[in-house]
Image (cartoon, rainbow, N blue to C red):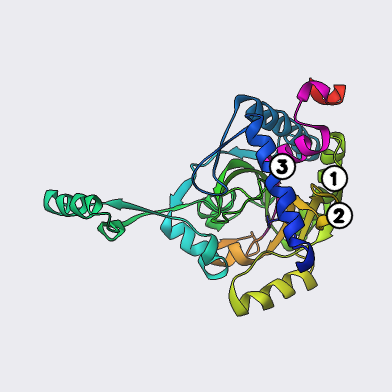
Amino acid sequence: MTTTHSAPETELSELDSARAAFRAELIDAGLLVPSSIPGLYGRSGEFEDIIEFVDARVTEAGLAEHGRQATRFRFAPVFPREAFERTDYIASFPNLTGAINTFEGDNKEHAALLAERSDGKDWDHFLHSAGTMLVSAACHPSYSMLTGTLPAEGTLMDIYGYCFRHEPAVDPARMQAFRMHEFVRVGTPDEAIAHRERWVPRGLQVLADLGLEAEAVIANDPFFGRAGRMLAANQRNENLKTELVVKLYGDLDDGTAVVSCNCHRDHFGHTFDISTVDGEPAHSACVGFGMERIALALLRTHGLDRSAWPAALRH
């Protein structure tokens, strides 16, 4: 899922002011707990109740669309660096990536670390890769277990978990740690495309049932660098990514993406050696519901006092 769409340059100041004001309201109401790092929050019990309410609706939509066919997986928020490398995420989004480092030295090195820490020096160079990475997309840990030949009917997965992206911002909808509930289809090209296409109207209905006004827009991921601009253009031109957006700040921007429907083509099929029964690289597609963003859209739309929400959303 991308971040909120860019606003015209002349409106950025007013837009950022609106974002900062909403953030302050959420903190004052005790719904979010701020930290010293922009975009990193604790959540209150009431905020978590809203998350659970949203997820129940998303789960119902999954059952309505797929019945009991989707296999449920819940992965840790970290996964092996080797699997991360095969996603090729570092090539497209190095600025969003998070790696896990740890101390593996002896007592002498530990003493040196503490001495530099006491002197106010940078002690990060004492840490080395733990061989793990923070999960950037909830579906990423799933592909390594699919290496080989898929069943004739392909595979369908229901995946929920925390993701990390290094995007410090005042906008409360742009969190560095957030949850995604995804439905992932891996199989033939036609199966992947059909999965994405079916979920666009299904996702819009989920949001409408929550009292949110959303629209589907063709979008692209925030690829990094000069080559990234070409990748982004190709993604848009080939209609591989559709976002369902809700306007949190009126006409100050084009809206905030709360659901993302994506076709990956055979990218993960190639990089993880996943093939269909006919020996061709598997194609994949996913739909991801941003739990925190939908919760924030509900609070922005219906107010911070849940007792005043429409009756259908209070129970």
* First of labels 2, 3 by sequence position: 3
Quadrant position of the C terminus in the picture = top right
| Residue type pointed to by label 2 | Asp
Which marked residue is nearer to the observer: mark 1 or mark 3?
3
- Contact between marks 1 and 3 (CB within 8 A): the answer is no
Cα separation, mark 1 vs mark 2, equals: 20 Å
Residue where numbered disc 1 is placed: 204
SS label for mark 1: helix
Q: Position of residue 293 (x, y in %)?
A: 70, 43
Residue 251: assigned label? 2
Asked if residue 288 lies in the magenta stretch, the reply is: yes
Q: What is the tally of numbered marks visible in this picture?
A: 3
Q: Is residue 7 above or below residue 104?
A: below
Residue where numbered disc 3 is placed: 22
SS label for mark 3: helix
Asked if residue 167 lies in the magenta stretch, the reply is: no
Residue at image location 68% in from the left, 78% down from the top: 230
| Residue type pointed to by label 1 | Leu
Crowdedness near tag 3: few (<14), some (14–19) or many (≥20) residues, C-alpha within 10 Å:
many
Which region is colored magenta?
284-308
Q: Is residue 27 above or below residue 114?
A: above
Cα separation, mark 2 vs mark 3, equals: 15 Å
